Image (cartoon, rainbow, N blue to C red):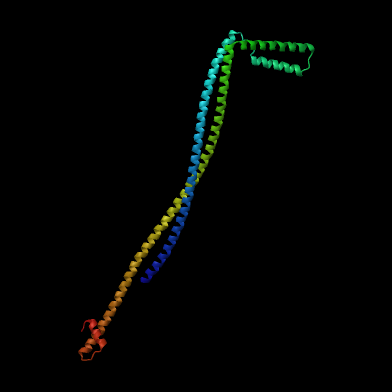
Amino acid sequence: MLNELQGRKGDLKDKSEEYKEKRNEFNLEASKCAAKRNDLNKRTKELIEEAQQLKKLRDENNEQVAQSKLKRDELNDQANKIYAEIDKIRKGLNLGDGPSLKELKKQIDGLEFRQQTEVMTPAKERELVDSITKLTDELKHKKQQLEGNTELKTLLEQAQALRDEALVHHNKVKEFADAAQQYHDKMIVIFKEADTIRAESDAAHKEFVKAQEAADEQHRLFIQTQKEIREINKVIIGLKRKTKEGKDESIREQAKKEAEEVYAQFKLGEKLNTEDLMLLQRSGLL
């Protein structure tokens, strides 16, 4: 039985070392997965912070768009009110009839271009010159009327100034809107990248859990074998103790038997030597 226990103990030691090695391997794998997961989580956090910053810039530019639109519309409303007053004055001066100054200038430029580039009969050319002269006189007349009316001139200048300022804000609307769109596009790209890396991190975490559970199982088996080894050691120690006690008892029985034989010879009158006397003393017969 002792031999069987010694063999069982040897097998358990081998298995214990195997479990220990596998446990350490799985723990190492779990550590690598955890490190990878942590690096990916760190990168995900950095990307999200970057995307949030872009979102903030996008929202700030969208706010600027709204403010610039509001200012532009306010200025255009003011200009429209002034133009309404100008129309009233023009009607009062009969300037509302016929083409505007801009249209007259455009017509004159077109006729002059034809005169310079087209080949025509003298009659046609005189007709064209007459038309240019008539339009030029009309343009001159309207300019004189406008320049002579201080109120109208002032209102036109005010309206134009408002239109110019409104255009500045309109350009800002486009500028801020373009910037907001750029920030938005970048934000979307970075959020998508963060989602991809987060998925990789989740996969690494699953591998970490899997390796950690495997390591825990190997550790459990290691502890179990160590416990079995300790139990077998107790049994082996007990068996060895009983074997030793049996041997001691056998020695004592043999010594007692020998002492009884010496004592019997002593009673018959035989002389005892020193060893015989010591044997009798140890056995308690003397």
Q: Position of residue 52 (x, y in %)?
A: 49, 37
Q: Looking at the figure, which quarter contains the C terminus?
A: bottom left
Judge from the rendering whether residue 228 lies leftward or rightward of residue 190; answer left or right.
Answer: left
Judge from the rendering whether residue 223 lies leftward or rightward of residue 72; answer left or right.
Answer: left
Q: Is residue 266 above or below residue 228?
A: below
Q: Position of residue 224 (x, y in %)?
A: 38, 60
**What residue lies at 69% left-to-right and 15% top-to-bottom?**
107
**What residue lies at 44% left-to-right and 62% top-to-bottom?**
18
**What residue lies at 51% left-to-right and 29% top-to-bottom?**
64
Q: Toward the viewer: 100 or 237?
A: 100
Count of labels in the image: 0
Q: Toward the viewer: 38 or 192?
A: 38
Q: Looking at the figure, which quarter contains the N terminus?
A: bottom left
Q: Toward the viewer: 116 or 230?
A: 116
**What residue lies at 71% left-to-right and 13% top-to-bottom?**
132
Q: Toward the viewer: 32 or 258?
A: 32
- Quadrant assignment, res 247: bottom left
Q: Is residue 98 visible?
A: no
Judge from the rendering whether residue 217 lies leftward or rightward of residue 80; answer left or right.
Answer: left
